[in-house]
Image: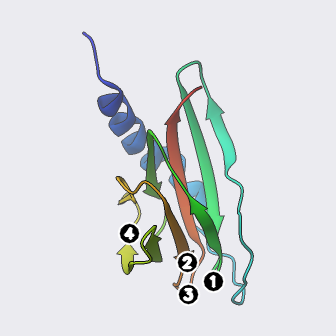
Amino acid sequence: MKMSITTIVSCLAVCLSVTVAPAFAGNTPSGPTTRTTKVFQQVLATENLRILSLELAPGEQLDFHTSPEQEAYAASAGTLRITDADGAQKEVDVKAGDRLWGDLSYFQNVNTGSKTLKIMLLERAK
């Protein structure tokens, strides 16, 4: 049976929410910060897929970037402010398992919540 990459990624996301995400469940208390350009940590790499993780403390942001052919999921609940290339902003309350910023081509996100936000990213291996 042939499966699409979307089917595979969806299955992996469900598996991650049950197995990997609990490891990210605790929140480390910290005050607001202004650090930028966070680096994703590689969790798993196969011939076809990479799984990465990221933690954004309250006030931390990712600089403007693109996410081609990637799927990002919240591994914990939180609040993000997403700014697109035109400067339009929206606040998004996410819960663990939510898909994040799916079709944005160039954007920035800031953790505007009170807890560290954990994100899991799935992408095709290059």
What type is the residue that disc 1 sits on? Gly
Which picture quadrant has residue 47?
top right
Circles 2 and 1 in contact, beta carbons < 8 Å: yes
Q: Which colour scheme is used?
A: rainbow
Q: Name the residue under label 3.
A: 114
What type is the residue that disc 4 sits on? Lys
Residue drawn at 52 percent across, 71 percent down = 109
Q: Which of marks 4 and 1 is nearer the N terminus?
A: 1
What type is the residue that disc 2 sits on? Asn
Q: Nearer the viewer, mark 4 or mark 1?
A: 1
- In the picture, the disc for residue 95 is 4
Task: Give the percent coordinates (x, y) of residue 101.
Answer: 40, 59
Badge 4 element = loop
Task: Give the percent coordinates (x, y) of residue 48.
Answer: 52, 21
Q: Mark 2 points at which residue?
A: 111
C-alpha gap between disc 2 and disc 1: 5 Å
Is 59 situated above or below 82? below
Q: Mark 1 points at which residue?
A: 59
Residue drawn at 75 percent across, 76 percent down = 35
Q: Which of marks 3 and 1 is in front?
A: 1
Residue drawn at 60 percent across, 75 percent down = 116
Q: In this view, does 35 lie to the left or right of 14?
A: right
Badge 2 element = strand
- In the picture, the disc for residue 21 is none
Badge 1 element = loop
